Image: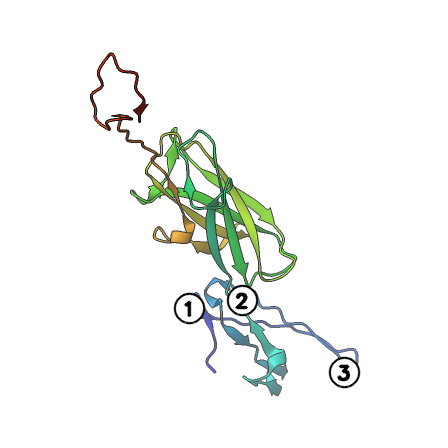
Amino acid sequence: ELPILVDGKEVEGETTFTPTEANGKVKVIFTLNAKELAGKEVVVFETLYRKGEVVVTHEDIEDEAQTVVFLEPSITTEARDKEDGDQDVLPKEKVVIEDTVTYTNLIPKLEYVIKGKLYDKSTGEPLLVDGKEITAEKIFTPKESNGEVTLTFVVDASALAGKEIVVFESLYRENKEVVVHHDIEDKEQTVYVTNPSIQTEAKDGLTTSNTVLPEMITTIID
């Protein structure tokens, strides 16, 4: 039942009022940085004073009506090739990667921004194409606490054959970072740029050898 500390200080609020009737209501406002309180339950204790002397207190750690729960938002993601839905893309000039972000514990009807960036797994650094990072973002307002939203990345992958691309995401509310999902080892966030190759073997269709007499009519099978 110890007071919570935010930036090393207790969080307090105070309201001075003069009631017009014996019974009524009054608001006490608390303003705090709640970034470190995700997942915690906070209970408000109140004390009423008259001329500096305590009149009555309401301190019940089990009172649900006094309790505020700070949600702990989270996101998980799945990056896929838009063309066929798998995690392999061809090294071509235009590749579209769709990253489905599943979120939990957001506040409905409030505006959020999800931002994503592509990373090169081999270096752990942002992927650069023609010297530029590949990013995407989307503004959305969830109807419910849990749901999903999709980010779309368009990439020139013609020079990326053999690379593994990992999507990093950050969720913002009013320009403040709420939650991130940055995991260079997450397979669900990874797309693989294939490195197509071919090998051939030409043979005489009749003798299956590599030599053919010039006067013969034959079939060569490659």
Q: Residue 31, position in %: x, y?
A: 56, 65
Name the side, left or right, on which 91 lies relative to 25. left
Q: Amino acid at mark 1?
A: Gly
Which residue is rendered at x = 52% and y = 50% of the image?
100
The one nearer the camera, 199 or 76, is 199
Q: Which residue is mark 1?
A: 8
Q: Which residue is mark 3?
A: 23
Which residue is rendered at x = 61% and y = 50% of the image?
140
Name the side, left or right, on which 183 lies relative to 106. left
Residue 210 visible from this viewpoint: yes
Q: Neighbour class for label 2 at 10 Å: few (<14), some, many (≥20)?
A: some
Q: Is residue 44 above or below residue 100?
A: below
Q: Amino acid at mark 3?
A: Asn
Q: Residue 153, position in %: x, y?
A: 49, 39
Between tags 1 and 2, which lies in front?
2
Q: Are marks 1 and 3 in contact (CB under 8 Å)?
A: no
Q: Which mark is residue 71?
A: 2
The image quarter in which residue 193 lies: top left
